[in-house]
Image: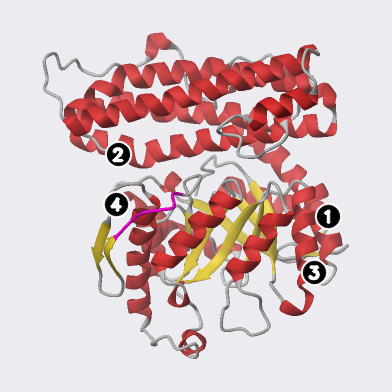
Amino acid sequence: MPDYGHPLIFGAFVTPDARSYHQTMALARLADELGLDIVGVQDHPYQPKFLDMWTFLSSLASVTSRVTLFADVATLPLRPPAVLARSAATLDLLSNGRVELGIGIGAFSKATASMGVAERSTGERIEALEEAIEIFRALWTPGPPVSFAGKHYSLIEAKPGPAPLHSIGIHVGAYKPRMLRLTGRLADGWIPTAAYASPSELVEMAAIIDNAAADAGRSPVDVRRWYNIAGSFTSREGGFLQGAPTFWVAQLTELALEQGISGFILAPGAAAESELRRFAEEVVPGVRSLVAAARGVPESLDADEQLDLEPSERTTGHEPVLDEATRPRAPLAVGAATTPAGEASAQMLVNVHAHLRSELEEILGVVAEVASGHSSPALARSLINRMSMRQNYWSLGAFCATYCRVLTIHHAIEDANLFVDLRSRDSSLGPVIGRLGEEHEVVAAVLTRLDAALVAMVEDPEYLGAVQSEVERLADVLLSHLDYEEQELLGPIARLGIRI
């Protein structure tokens, strides 16, 4: 299995123990302060010693500012999907777009039955999960009322909303073939746990996901792979994550590069705070550095020559994909009729691109003003607070990072939906769509560099110049890409009646 090139994420998997919730909340705050990316909370509503997951995640949202809040994973039999969809969307809005949804069929059927839910067979629970995923996406998508008649769940003219602030990923906890195939067909991510799936067992499981994705007309890249892990920092090395931090770095890097795992969520042990600090300060930077080097993305910002690389030089063995002379062009369809739905979709794409261009221009302006000394941090903060995409992020770095995340999600949606629909309706668009997909990878590489510059700036304000350089580089690449996409796809979208 290859490295799929997804951005690496690292986080903490915390236990919502009602007896020590103050310590657990402190651990989540520490993860936020240490620069980790995600805090996962398990869901066992039948366990009286545990806090309710959604209530607890909401509390964590109030004491953190940047980490993603992850249901790791929600027990579907005890969470009606229509209500769960609204719960997740509500928390995403209240947390400024920081929610991801893990979902499972409920491993402990007897325990769920004890809460008054009719016991279902494994097959029935898998069917219910498939229906739930459809309901989630229907209720998160603005539009007319939705009806759905499934075997296990139904909607009768249910009105979608509230719409989440960002496209919430649906990550399935899966281990057996049928669940793995469902993950490959439908999910945005896969979230196994090391206690139930060792690194060696992941290989066969991932192959099932990849084959199912291909059979469904998707790419294996469409399914992000996160891994709940646990280990011990010891002087003697042996077994998975049993050894010094350098041993952890080697093992996690191997999983990232050879098995495509892009997320590692640590369940710390008894010395939770100490373990989480060592993970964040000694393991995470090492893994990021080695993976960046293997991907051909310069990780260190110390060398001036790395900051001077051209976008085409940062690709990994491909031709310069932003070279306009080599871009494929869509066949002309002079005089072809358009459809009202297609024209509306084409205009929607133009509007999305216009918003990205507008926000990018504001980022460039505020970075330039701060870098030149013509704007104080207070004035920059005031400007950022008025921007639609910042959503209460009160620092330059956090605002830029939010823009990067939104841009990445926009490209992921295009790859998984728009491009698939266009290619299936008109095969002659294949070369153009293939090139646009490659350019998404180039933009992703630039975003990775910008993220590294932002992290460096937090530690040393001297890196503000590097941030400015990377934002300007992003502008060059992104604006060229958006122009190319509009030139080649607006006509086919309007002509083919593609829905966005």
- Checking the image for residue 420, the label placed there is 2
Q: Residue at x 30, y 19 (%)?
A: 488
**Mark 1 in CB contact with mark 2 (< 8 angstroms):** no
**Mark 4 in CB contact with mark 3 (< 8 angstroms):** no
Q: Residue at x 62, y 22 (%)?
A: 363
- Horizontal side of 167 relative to 271 (left or right) equals left
Mark 3 and mark 2 lie on one chain; the one further toward the N terminus is 3
- Checking the image for residue 109, the label placed there is none
Q: Amino acid at mark 4?
A: Ala
**Mark 3 in CB contact with mark 2 (< 8 angstroms):** no
Q: Which element is circle 2 on?
A: helix
Q: Position of residue 222 (x, y in %)?
A: 43, 46
Q: Amino acid at mark 3?
A: His
Residue to which mark 4 is pinned: 216
| Badge nearest the viewer, 4 or 1 | 1
| Badge nearest the viewer, 4 or 2 | 2
Q: Residues within 10 Å of mark 3 (few under 14, many from 20)?
A: few
Q: Which residues are the magenta region?
A: 158-163
Q: Amino acid at mark 2?
A: Val
Q: CA distance from mark 1 to mark 2?
A: 42 Å
Residue to which mark 1 is pinned: 277
Residue to which mark 3 is pinned: 22
